[in-house]
Amino acid sequence: MVWVKLGSSNFSSCPNGSSQWIWDVLGECAQDAWDKASVGLGLLSILCFAASTFPQYIKACKTGNMDQALSLWFLLGWIGGDSCNLIGSFLADQLPLQTYTAVYYVLADLLMLSLYFYYKFKKRPSPWSAPINSLLLFILGVACATPLLRAAGSVAAPGEAFQGRTLLSVGPSNKPFTRKEIIGFVIGSVSSALYLFSRLPQIRTNFLRKSTQGISYSLFALVMLGNTLYGLSVLLKNPEEGQSEGSYVLHHLPWLVGSLGVLLLDTIISVQFFLYRHAAPSSERQPLLPS
């Protein structure tokens, strides 16, 4: 979500009936209906993303074949994208809610990855189990320590005057990228690329298995809804002062491409759920005894 971080003493710079609760809880200067709709849709997208992994946890415990149903590269790409999102929110000094949400995403990914290796090594013990567990614990420690580091070094940005959304404007122009925005743009691009490429191995796995058993469709359905709401929240947000609509979209292009691109690929996975809804995995279709 795109929010403008303002200091606690800058509430006077939010005219036009800014909502007090949005300012108090999120530090967001929601100055008109567009900003309020952006905040509302952004919060709903966070709830969708937060709830998306729970159905897969339950499905994994019931079926016990998570290591066969989900592609390892899908999980690695997902955690890589969320990790870049966490690093970007830390370096760009985003709002606490964004950083804590990013930490939750990484923790949820680690739990899903742990379930994958648990069922994989439970069936086929491997000498790599100990190093992998150590790596997961290291990533867990980094994810938990990031909010503490961010809280120690966060500095509030100066306030910005309000400018309403305009379709045809003469005054606003292209806003140049600052060094911090360039870093965030690069990290956002890497995160979006990882999100996109993570879906391809899962699509291939579903195609080879001719089945989606062991995968919860609620995982992808809630992610699709979350990406839709997230994209709308970014597009509805008012540009900053002196910034045109085109420049605003350009500054947030990696996140828009990532959310809308993943939405398209998740639609393909949804089609696979429909096509393979009555099919059994290839391993289950093989005879028990050779003919």
Image: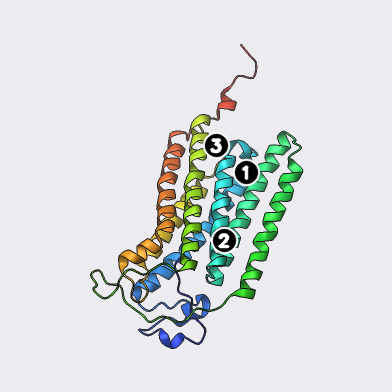
Give whichever of 90, 164 is nearer the camera: 90
Q: Secondary structure at mark 3?
A: loop
Q: Amino acid at mark 3?
A: Gln
Whole-angstrom CA distance, mark 3 to mark 1, is 10 Å
Q: Amino acid at mark 2?
A: Leu
**Residue at x-position 66% and y-position 46%:** 115
Q: To which residue does mark 3 refer? A: 213
Q: Secondary structure at mark 1?
A: helix
Q: Is residue 82 left or right of residue 122?
A: left
Q: Is residue 203 above or below residue 49?
A: above
- Identify the disc placed on residue 86: 2
Image coordinates of residue 136 in percent, x first then y, are 69, 51
Whole-angstrom CA distance, mark 2 to mark 3, is 31 Å
- Identify the disc placed on residue 69: none
Image coordinates of residue 76 in percent, x first then y, are 59, 46
Mark 2 vs 3, N-terminal side: 2
Q: Amino acid at mark 1?
A: Ala
